[in-house]
Amino acid sequence: MKKDFDCDNLHEVKSEWLRSYVVEMMRKQKSPRTIHRKVSAYRTYVKFAKRCGDMMEDPSESISLPKLSKRLPSVVPEHAMRDLFEENVFADDWKGRRDKSLIALMYETGMRQGEIIGLQISDLDTERMELCVMGKGSKERRIPLLQETMQSINDHIKERPFKSNFLFVTDAGRSLYASFIYRRVHYYLSLVSSLKKMSPHVLRHTFATHLLSRGAELSAVKDLLGHASLSSTQVYTHQSLTRMKQLHAASPLDVRPKK
């Protein structure tokens, strides 16, 4: 900005200068996210200057920024998840059953990583085949489980050589932590997928997208995910529609009526 405007003090920046700066970046075909990031950095400085009493107004308030395109979440294909559980990739011991139960639970319920870490054995309702989950804002929700997943969880608890109130523990018998879950998820997903991003949150995206692709109601998926509003869940409908369009475009069948 100093190259085009004679300004050595950020306190003296004017709104019209910022507008010209944004226009110049757009002319140079900078990405919308780059433009947002640069303006955001200046706005952060202004907030600091206001707290210090050095500035009274924010010159960037009247600036219009280019629209950001929505990033569709990464999703593991259904066939890849099916391969993961059908092939013998999990070790035949309590650690392997823990890993299988952990991955299955995240994929079948869409639970957040933090929710998984906090799970207690007492949260498991074997009779009702449900799991009681404490979500954001201390909101409790009950999630149904498949019988196979319930059995796998119970088996690994009985087999593990450690006594713990936690539903899942590390190899050393301690409570789970974020990096441990990430490493487990990344390792197993890398066996069946070539996605660049293979994190616990990808399993949450995968759960929601696969459910909607198979006809589940948006409101039901919202409740399972523990979202406060439908707007947070609607991003997965875009993912489902995009996937359907891709499958339709790749189909060799011509369903148009013959003349």
Image (cartoon, helix red, strand yellow):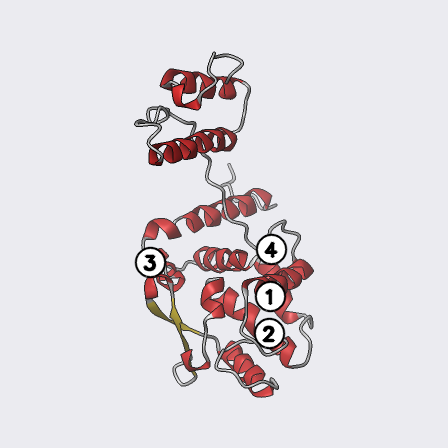
Residue at the disc numbered 3:
219
Spatial distance from mark 3 to mark 4, Cα to Cα?
A: 26 Å
Q: Secondary structure at mark 1?
A: helix
Instruction: Identify the residue position indicated by label 4 in the image.
Output: 198
Mark 4 burial class by Cα count in 10 Å: few <14, some 14-19, many 20+? many
Identify the mark at residue 180; answer none if there is no mark: 1
2 and 1 marks in contact (CB < 8 Å): yes
- Residue shown at the point (61%, 70%) measured from the top left: 85
Dot 2 alpha-carbon crowd within 10 angstroms: few under 14, some 14 to 19, many 20 or more: some
Residue 255 appears at what percent x and percent y? Answer: 52, 44
Q: Nearer the viewer, residue 208 or 99?
A: 99
| Residue 48 vertical placement versus 247 (above, below) | above
Residue 125 higher or lower than 10, as above or below: below
- Judged from the image, the secondary structure of the residue bearing numbered disc 3 is helix
Type of residue at label 3? Ser
Residue ID for mark 2? 170
First along the sequence among labels 1 and 4: 1
- Residue 172 position in % (x across, y down): 63, 77
Snapshot quadrant of residue 101: bottom right
Q: Position of residue 59 (x, y in %)?
A: 35, 23
Q: Are marks 3 and 4 in contact (CB under 8 Å)?
A: no
Residue 176 visible (yes or no)? yes
The kind of secondary structure element at disc 4 is loop
